[in-house]
Structure formats: structure tokens, C-alpha cells
Amino acid sequence: MKRILILLGCATLLTGCNVYRQFERPEVETGSLFGHDVRAVDTASIASLPWTELFTDPMLQSLIREGLANNTDLGIARWRVEEAKAMLFSSRLAYLPSLSLNPQGQLSRQVTSRQADEGNPLVNSSTRSSSATYNIAASAEWEVDIFGRLTNAKRGAKAALEQSVAYKQAVRTQLIVTIANGYYNLLTLDRQLDISRRTAVSWDEILRTYEAKLRVGEATAAAVAQGKASKLAVEGQVLTLEKQIRAQENSLSALLGRVPGSIERATLEGQSFPEHLAVGVPLQLLDRRPDVCQAEATLAQAFYNTNAARAAFYPSITLSGQAGWTNTNGAVIMNPGSWLLNAIGSLTQPLFNRGRNIANLRIAKARQEEAVLSFRQSLLKAGNEVNDALAQWQTADSRLGIDREQVEALRVAVDNTTKLMQYSNQASYLEVLTASQSLLQAELTEANDTFDKIQGVINLYHALGGGCSP
């Protein structure tokens, strides 16, 4: 025992090695992470907004809350966090001694028979005796964490918990933006369906005009056939849009954890978003992006796993003790007997172990280097997503100005050519057809660009790490 205590003292002097070193985030360059054309000097960012302040549509907010409560992927992520908490709790209890109780007892009975004399035909007589023995023993073992095996296991479990929490947040924010994207896509399809239906109605009027002119000889059969073909094309587009709307509703229902059905919603025209989007500074991504936080926690866990693999080369010191209460007098159960007390210290020094410790350390180091590269790659990915989302929003915003002017000009053209065709022969059916088809395409494009701008806001919000409570 004295030798073990001396070894403990010597080991304490050797704890300056790396097995107790804390994890530190590696140096990363974030200055131009958003791209050289993005000025990021202000710490204000739309990512600091709660999602309820960015998505102000009450119907969308109701859908998001329903999704957060019922989505199965988010439910799985929550249970992963609970699992990681249990692992951390177990690693903390490893510092305490392990106790065990091993009671034993035995009851024996002995019967001896004696035959009567031959001259006395009496029944046989017997003598009975019994004895009881018992042994109540308790033992305890305690591993002395001199070389940090338990400490690194606990820190690794804590990093695993942080990784699970970041994963849950990543699933949560992804769910929020996916529901929002699906909702606004549904509004866009509604807008396109309305445009197509109105176009089909206008083509009905144009076709009736063609047929009337054909009867009086002012139009040709070819013009009527061309008008009918254009009307049927629009009607086919209406059916396609109705199919896409149903598919989008079913997709949203799956995210919400409900059976397929209709989704209550508003209109695309009633949506509003900030006119100016602040991106903050790239350094904020390290704390706001859940996937970046998850990659950093994975790196920390790999770091502590490497420390634990390194600690396996050092001795394992365990203190154990036993205490017992036993009887030795046989028949008297209440006899306390004798007390048994002993304490033992053991030291296990790994020598060769078939190279397993060396291999485990190499594996742990390789996984740590992989985690470093994954962490840096996640940060680069985050910067690219911010740049792409900002470009998407800016481009769509510029295109919308052009779309509105184009739609207004084509409406005037359709109105004028239709009147000229109806009341005079100064405009042919081909001019009316071309103007109407151009107007339809311009209105559909305007709806698409409106959704593209909204999606740019959503993607930028997500890329910056938005999606905080509530």
C-alpha cells in the first residue's frame, strides 16, 4: 500500500502531459468569409430576430408551431439530446466508488435414526439437529483518476451533449425554413393558378370573337384553330398547377406530422419582409450556425478521445476494500461472529497489449484531424450560403422592378390589340395571340421572381444561423 501511495505521488508530478489539456477552437480566418463584395462591418444581423418577427403571417406561424410540436425528425433529435445527457450523467458518476453487497446464507438439518432392541418391538426413534451460517460481505472499488482517463471521458461526453444540442437546433431551424419555403411556394402556385385561370377566361372571349368574325368572313379558320389551341394550352397549365398545389400541400402535411389534406393559407400579395437585410460579421457564424457549432463539438469530442487514448499508456490505479459480518458458531443466528476488513490497492501498467494502445491512439489522432477539416469546411460552406442567399435576394429584387414594368406594358398591348381586333381589322389574331401569351409568361415570371426574393430572405436568415426561440 505504501508503494502505491508513492506511485500516486510520482504520478501527480507527471500530470503536466497533454492528457489534461483543455480543447481550444482552432484558428480560422473569417474576415472575407462572405466574399469580397459583401461589406460586413456592423454586428447587427437579421439572424438575431426570432422567427416570429420575420415570418409575420399568422397562418404560417400556426403551421410552424404545429411542425415544431409534431415533426418526427425533430422528435428524434430531442431524444438524442436525452441520450447524450444520460451518457454525461454516467461519466460523472464514474468518479464515485462502486459498491456491491454479497450476502450469503446456508441452513442445514441433520437427522439420525436408532433401531430399537430386538426384544422390544417399538417403533424407531430419531434425533434431529440443525445449523445456520451466514456471511454478509460488502466491497468497494475506486479508480484514482491520476492520468485523466475519467476526466477526458467526461469532457468527451459533454462535447457529445453539445453536439446533440446543436444537431437538434439544426433540425429545428431547417424545419422552420422548410415549412416557410413550402408555404410561400404554395402561395406562388396559387398566384400562378389565378393568373392562368384569368388568362383562360380571356381566351374564351377572344375565341368567341374569332368565331363571330369567322361567320361574317372577317377571320379565317386557321385563326379560330390557333385561338382554340392557345386556350387548351392554358387549361392544361391550370391542371398542372392544381396537381403541383396538391403535391405541395401533401409535402407540408408530412412536415407537420398530419395526414395529407388542404393547408389554410393567405395570399402572396399580403406578405411583407424587411427592405434592408443586415448580415452582421462572419465571426458570428461560429456561435449562431448550428451546423458549425455541431462540427466544433465533434472536434472537441475527437480531441478528448485522443487524450483518453493517450492516457491508456499510463498506469491504472484502483483502490478496493471489503467488509463483512459472519457467524462462526453455527446454531446462533444472532451471533455477530467476526468483522472482516481489508483494503487493497492495485496498479495495472500496460506494457505491450499487442499494440492495441498504439493503434487506438493513431486512430484517435486521425479522427481528430478529420474533425478539424470538417469544422473548417462547415465554416466555408456557411460563408458560401450567405453569399449565395444575398445574391439571390438582390438579383430577384432587381428583376422584380423589370417584371412589373414589363407586365404593365404587355397589359396595355393586349388591351389595345384586342380592341383593334374586335372593332376594326387593324390588328390580326397573331398580334393578339402574341401579346396575350407574352403577358401570361410575364405575369408567371413576376410571381416566380416574387417567390425567389422571399426565398432569398429565408435562405439568408437560415445561412446566418437564424431560427432562435420562440
Image (spheres, helix red, strand yellow):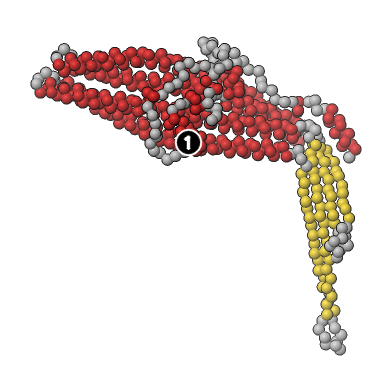
- Compared with 23, 140 (above or below) is below
What is the residue that sits farthest to the left in this orientation?
216
**Which of the 4 quarters of the picture holds residue 252?**
top left
User: What is the crowding at mark 1: few (fewer than 14 residues within 10 Å), some, or many (at least 20)?
Assistant: some
Q: Position of residue 209 (x, y in %)?
A: 16, 22
Question: Does residue 140 appear left or right of residue 155 in this picture?
Answer: right
302 or 195, which lies in front?
195
Question: Does residue 284 appear left or right of residue 98 in this picture?
Answer: left
Labels in figure, total: 1
460 or 36, which lies in front?
460
Question: Which residue occupies 58% across, 16% down?
Answer: 43
What is the residue that sits farthest to the right in this orientation?
2
Please identify the quadrant where the N terminus is shown: top right
Question: Which residue occupies 35% across, 19% down?
Answer: 446
- Compared with 20, 279 (above or below) is above
Secondary element under disc 1, as helix, strand or loop, is helix
Q: Position of residue 131 (x, y in %)?
A: 84, 66
Question: Does residue 272 appear left or right of residue 108 in this picture?
Answer: left
Question: Label 1 sits on what residue type?
Answer: Glu
- Compared with 207, 420 (above or below) is above
What is the residue that sits farthest to the bottom in this orientation?
119
Q: Position of residue 261 (x, y in %)?
A: 39, 38
Question: Does residue 233 appear left or right of residue 462 in this picture?
Answer: left
Question: Which residue occupies 72% across, 29% down?
Answer: 307
- One can see residue 363 in this view: no
- Compared with 405, 183 (above or below) is below
**Which of the 4 quarters of the picture holds residue 377?**
top right
Q: Position of residue 407 (x, y in %)?
A: 31, 16
Report the residue marked by disc 1: 66
Question: Which residue occupies 27% across, 16% down?
Answer: 411
- One can see residue 140 in this view: yes
